[in-house]
Amino acid sequence: MTPDVYADMWDEIAPARSVWLITLADLALLLVGFFVLLQANRELDRESLLAGLRAGFGIEETAPAPMAVASTRVEGFAEGSAVADMSGAILWARGAARDPRTRITVTGSAEGGRDLDPATGSAAILAADRARAVAAALVRSGAADPARISIVTDPGKRRAVTLSVGFAGGAN
């Protein structure tokens, strides 16, 4: 083909608008969206804004739990009992959760089979009792604020309670 033929082909496939105009329109829309978010951030508190964004995208659950950065374990529970020495966990919580932006997750566990709650015969209830006992000891001793403690159960693993601390953010 001759160079003149290529020139004719280029004219046939040339876009109707300049490419830079589409890029400029995209940039303008992104900029408008950014300013809308800035304005919404001034009008609402952070949690309301995040809830609105989650609802707008169809997400029903809340933000994920904070990622654990340190953990410890309370062991020594007798079979079917929620009583153990919690002094080590109290000392750990005082040091690990000094920053008010952290949260402590207390996960109670009970072995399946013979390690069951004596009144109900449930490993899940025994795991919850163990986690509650450790959380109550942390609050009684002043090692943690009850608003910063989450209790979770995980029956079927071992006779222990695992404590983990994670950064939850905020400006406290």
Image (tube, helix red, strand yellow):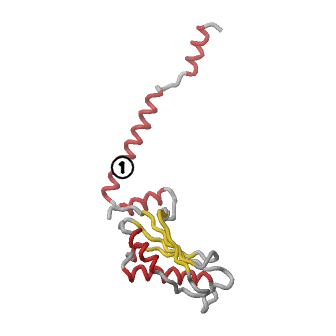
Q: Is residue 146 above or below residue 11?
A: below
Residue 37, how many percent across, how many down? 37, 51
Q: Quadrant for the C terminus, please.
A: bottom left
Which quadrant of the view contains residue 135?
bottom left
Along the viewing direction, whichever of 30 and 161 lies nearer the viewer: 161
- Residue placed at 41% from the left, 41% from the top? 29
Task: Specify the quadrant of the image occupied by residue 30.
Answer: top left
Q: Residues within 10 Å of mark 1 (few under 14, many from 20)?
A: few
Q: Could one spot residue 62 in this view of the protein?
A: no
Residue 124 pos. (x, y %): 60, 81
Quick one: which residue is furthest to the right in this view?
Answer: 113
Q: Is residue 156 visible?
A: yes
Q: Amino acid at mark 1?
A: Val
Q: Which image quadrant: the N terminus?
A: top right
In the displayed structure, does residue 144 sit left or right of residue 121? left
Residue drawn at x 53%, y 84% is: 129
The residue under label 1 is 36
Which x, y percent locates residue 54? 47, 59
Q: Is residue 165 above or below residue 146?
A: above
Residue 159 spot, x, y in % from top left: 59, 79
Placement of 31 over or under 125, stated as above or below: above
SS at mark 1 in the image: helix
Residue beneath the point at 39% across and 70% down: 95
